[in-house]
Image (cartoon, grey):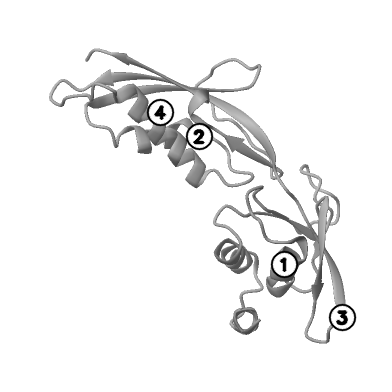
Amino acid sequence: RKRMDEANSRGLATYNGMLSYLQNFISPLVGLSVNDESDADADGVPGHSLRVTIPNDVTLTDDAIAGRIWACKPAGIGTSGDERGTAVDASLKPHEVHFARPKSVNVYVSVTITQYSEEAFPSDGENIVKGKIAEWCSNNLSPGKDVLPIRLFVPILEVPGVESAAILLKKENGEFSPDPIRITSEETAEVPLQNIEVNVAAG
């Protein structure tokens, strides 16, 4: 409670401050969508409302999540989402707070690596690359975040012996493409090991 009061007194009840607060106190992968217009937006967030999306692996109670949201939410802005909890203000008055849990979207990755002739590519390099990609996605794909092929170069280039890589993505039942995978504010992209294939071409 003391930390929540201190957060509000420092003026964190702004959208950027709110997101930082929730990512610090709930999960680094909390998502936030804001609609300042009068009508509902394309993601279904009502006018003058926000939607906080809480990762499915967060084990806080609904009331605890609601309390965190209430502690940093800008005044006069509604909350939306299918989940709900009760927050209690400083006057012990209860407030119903809504939030969302993301729907998982399986994304598949196909990588073709060209080896760099001046470095040795590990004998089990394909599996190392898969592991690097899966770990990076797990740590960085928060609710609503698109999957961009160019960003997957970050984990791939951590493996020695890689000169370049061609990266293709698809959703389930889709076709591989070099285009980004677009994720809505109530979705989270999932890229486990079994969704990743790696092929290696000689440099």
The reply to whether the C-beta atoms of the residues labelled 4 and 1 are less than 8 Å apart is no
Q: Which mark is residue 148?
A: 2
Q: Label 1: which residue?
A: 64
Q: Earlier in the sequence, mark 4 or mark 1?
A: 1
In the figure, 201 relative to 44: above or below?
A: above
Q: CA distance from mark 2 to mark 4?
A: 16 Å
Q: Mark 1 or mark 2: which is in front?
A: 1
Percent position of residue 81, x then y: 80, 52
Residue type at mark 1: give it. Answer: Ala
In the image, what residue occupies the spot 60% across and 83% down?
Answer: 6
Q: Label 4: which residue?
A: 130
In the figure, 131 relative to 202: above or below?
A: below
Q: Earlier in the sequence, mark 2 or mark 3?
A: 3
Q: Earlier in the sequence, mark 2 or mark 4?
A: 4
Quarter of the C terminus within the rendering: top left
Q: CA distance from mark 3 to mark 1?
A: 15 Å
Percent position of residue 43, x then y: 76, 43
Q: CA distance from mark 2 to mark 3?
A: 44 Å
Query: For mark 1, does the 10 Å Cα neighbourhood hold few (<14), some (14 to 19), or many (20 or more) residues?
Result: some
In the image, what residue occupies the spot 64% across and 37% down?
Answer: 183
| 37 or 130, nearer to the observer | 130
The image quarter containing residue 197 is top left
Badge 1 marks a residue whose secondary structure is helix
Q: Mark 2 or mark 3: which is in front?
A: 3
In the figure, 171 relative to 142: above or below?
A: above
